[in-house]
Amino acid sequence: MDTDTAILASMLIPMLAAAGNMLLRDAPDLRDGMTLVAALATFGCVMNILVNVGNGTTAPMVLFSVMPGLDMAFNVEPLGLLFAIVASGLWIVTHLYGVGYMRGNNEDNHARFFCFFSIAIATTMGIAFSANMFTLFIFYEALTLSTFPLVAHKGTPEARNGARTYLAILIGTSIGLQLVAIIWTWTITGTLDFTKGGILEGHVAGSMVAVLLALYAFGIGKAALMPFHRWLPAAMVAPTPVSALLHAVAVVKAGVFTMLKVGIYIFGIDFLAETGASEWLMWLAAFSIIAASIVAMTKDNLKARLAYSTVSQLSYITLGMALATSMGVLGGGMHIAMHAMGKITLFMCAGSIYVAVHKTEISQMNGLGRAMPITYTAFLIGALSIIGLPPLGGSWSKWLLIMGAADTGQWVMILVLMLSSLLNVYYLLSIVGRGFFLPNPEIPAGARSAEAGLLVWLPPALTALGCLVLFFYAGGIETFLTPLVADMGVGDGQ
Amino acid sequence: MSTETVHHTALTLADHLPALQVLVPFIAAPLIVLFGRRGIAWPIALASSATAFAVSILLLSRVIDGSVISYHMGGWEPPLGIEYRVDAANAFVLLLVSAMSTLVLLFARESVEAEVSARHHALFYSAYLLCLSGLLGVAITGDAFNVFVFLEISSLATYVLIAQGSERDKRALTASYDYLIMGTIGATFFVIGIGFLYMATGTLNMADIADRISEQGSNRTIRAGFAFIVVGVGLKVAMYPLHSWLPNAYTYAPSMVTAFLAATATKVAIYVLLRFVFTVFDPGFLFEFNTLGYIILPLAIVAMFAASFIAVFQSDFKRMLAYSSVGQIGYILLGIAMLSQTGLTAAIVHLFNHGITKAALFMAVGAFVLTAKGSFYNDIQGLGRRMPLTSAAVVVGGLSLIGVPGTAGFVSKWLLVEAALENGWWPVALLVVASSLLAVIYVWRVLEVLYMQPTPDGSTVQEAPMSMLAPMWIAALACVYFGLDTDVTLTAAATAAEGLLAGSTGLQ
């Protein structure tokens, strides 16, 4: 399959799966089997692109022109390909988990759920392979809309309120700020193509660079930069598979991915470094990292805690871009993969606990670790990866970010990253500690394993293993991403 | 650049297209009454509207390159005789009006059966065709007094059509009466304005008036004429705060009438405004420049917010859409007030895009009224499952109303923001996007009612018939199509805008 076909196929296959889910609404096994095949095929397409292109960049494939100069166009470049690999690969695991979760939990409307889930994946692929900001924006909005029914899935008043917040913030920021930024960019440069080294240099100067960056940074609400982060905790009313794949991987990573794309291909990292326009963003990201971690500590609801942890971790990636150094960009890019693998593990474990014992509050989870050893071990591994301890994947991206901070002489940022790790240790490992060491009178010693079905505990175990594997392949990812920073002027210190 | 075709004497049928555009529905209207049989009324109406649509396609295809067709009614030379003058701007409006009329008629049969008493059907379709020919006439004519005549034909027919809603709700009568009063005041102002122009220039041909105005420059008579015309047309446009007739008229009129009026009537009035502002007068005049910049622009922005804000708090889907229309007209006026190529293009594109969007949505309202006997939120709650196709059309139309990427509404909004930024009007750009967030709220309220509330117990509501779904979905798919392929709309609008801006003066 040639690359262009594979790009289109990676979007069309999930769309077909969505249609198939609606057609086969009354044949659950066939329906879920078909979606699994679609997930495998989508991943196959993305891997096919990897084999074809490697970490090269292809010429844009223009599908059609919406307005003169504004094309629906796709291409492959390392960051997008990495994102596509992560999202499509984890879709396979999450789909298995989703089947186990939805059935084990007796949720309603499976067909509708998996239908919109597949559409969300299709739009994520569209974001990953967008060749210009216009195309990216179209898919960005489509992703918000296709995930809305998933957040509102339960149909309860809480679900409706959560979904309203979700929509209000994501649509509000994207239309209110991001769209203005995009049209501004278009008006002054006459192009929106993702171009290495950026397109803005020479078109905008002085403090306006920072203003434009602010419109983008806050307009990309999916990156959950404070103060526009509240949609993410609100989205936690969704069934856990949604939180796992979409709100730990696809949607939030689409946000920081867009942030990186804007930094690298619209502004150009050199341009940001020269003008210093991203310095305020760096401080804001640092604030987000610490503040969200502190809020996470106060949350007793497990998914809410994980959500705030995600808010904090996303700002690592924004920070990486805002540092405007090659190490920062590499660290940020790599963190997309590392955090995805770690956080999806944690969310799936949270869902696993919910399916098995219907507990959502951390204070009620004493002693569960002994009853659910696989889930808790997976959680421990995921947590350690998020914290950034070797031998787990998360340690490398954090290392690169620290290197990036050191390059620019931003010692405060190094402290922020260190402090954040300590806070991570506190709010993540305390959950594991409670699970293994605190007694729970409801669980008699020597009770049988309380683990839910195979499809619920196996997927988090697999992704936990993935965190371990990523530690050894981190070098590969770094090399893979190197073209992003290949001919940067400043990279090593200013 | 632009070529001009002039026909003095009868040549072939094709040369009479401008006349046929208006005359086909105009002659079909009394025919329906003469036959008097209600079975035959709808087919005749549909056939004549479809013919008008075909004619408008032919006309647009002839002028899209920027040329102008001048047709002399009865062979009388302008400026004494009445001239029909077709350029890209009004060919585009003719296309919109006749296309929407045909689509709405396809939809109308079941809806009219249900909402209008049977003994009125023949007269109803007859009035509808008069309204259509009036609107087409307003758009095509090059004679200022003729504009007034056609405006009155369409308005009088509209009052009748709105009053037909009284079968369902007696308030249709007061709504119609309100509009009659307001519309007549508007028409009076308009004709007084024409009178002033005639006084100043001694001619009624628009191109001729333009010539003479540019010769003599601004004087008090001309300024007074301009003021009367803008206010008079402003009433027809439902320019805020002259919009007060619109919400009731749209709410209580029969559904198909609302769908037709929302998609066409205010749009034609906007075209008249465009024609006078750019062709007859010249934005170069200080009084006009100031009117646009200091009166119309702020009012447009107020409309965008105030009307959208009121829409948020409605509990009737149809009434909500009516207020939304007032707000959307604000966007169009804003584009005009920018006085730039992009701004004018945005206004004309939005005129079209909003027309198809509202047509789809009001047709969905018609389907709800037919099956659920009402369009209040508690009538339609939970119908997302029972009427999946109608509800899905509401989703598509609603997204286009918000301006979500991939829909027609997005294209308009993009151009509008681009135009604002080109002018360096920062705050305006932000206000445009901010007000469109209000649309998110009022659209989402409906979607939540449809999809996230339980269907009342014992509800036996079924999906609307195919004859309604098909035209509704044609309009809904058009919202998507014109959001992804803007070749036709953008080219036509850009040519029209160019023509309006450049050809401000004269019979070339």
Image (cartoon, grey):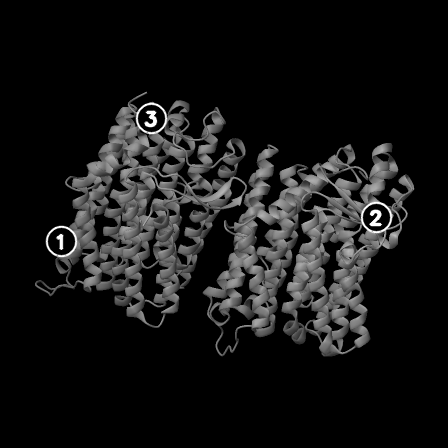
User: What residue do we see at 47% from left, 42% from top?
Assistant: A134
Q: Which residue is at the front of the view, B2 or A214?
A: B2
Horizontally, residue B250 falls left or right of residue B12, namely left
Horizontally, residue B407 falls left or right of residue A318, namely right
User: Image height check: is B486 above or below A150?
Assistant: above
Horizontally, residue A124 falls left or right of residue B51, namely left
- Looking at the image, the residue that sits furthest to the top is A494
Query: Is the residue under label 1 in contact with that under label 3 (CB below 8 Å)?
Result: no
Q: Mark 2 points at which residue?
A: B144
Q: Which residue is at the front of the view, B61 or A12?
A: B61
- Element carrying mark 2: helix
Between marks 3 and 1 in the image, the one whose residue lies nearer the viewer = 3
Residue B262 percent coordinates (x, y): 67, 58
Q: Name the residue under label 3.
A: A488
Quote the CA–CA distance across marks 2 and 1: 87 Å
Residue B426 percent coordinates (x, y): 57, 35
Taking the image as drawn, is residue B295 in sight?
Answer: no
Q: Which residue is at the front of the view, A485 or A105?
A: A485
Query: Is the residue under label 1 in contact with that under label 2 (CB below 8 Å)?
Result: no
Q: Looking at the picture, which amino acid does disc 2 mark?
A: Ala
Do pointers 2 and 3 mark residues of a single chain?
A: no
- Looking at the image, the residue that sits furthest to the front is B11
Which quadrant does the N terminus of chain B fall into? Answer: top right
Quote the CA–CA distance across marks 3 and 1: 49 Å
Query: Is the residue under label 3 in contact with that under label 2 (CB below 8 Å)?
Result: no
Q: Name the residue under label 1.
A: A436
Q: Which chain carries label 3?
A: A
Residue A486 percent coordinates (x, y): 30, 29
Q: Which chain carries label 2?
A: B
Quote the CA–CA distance across marks 2 and 3: 65 Å
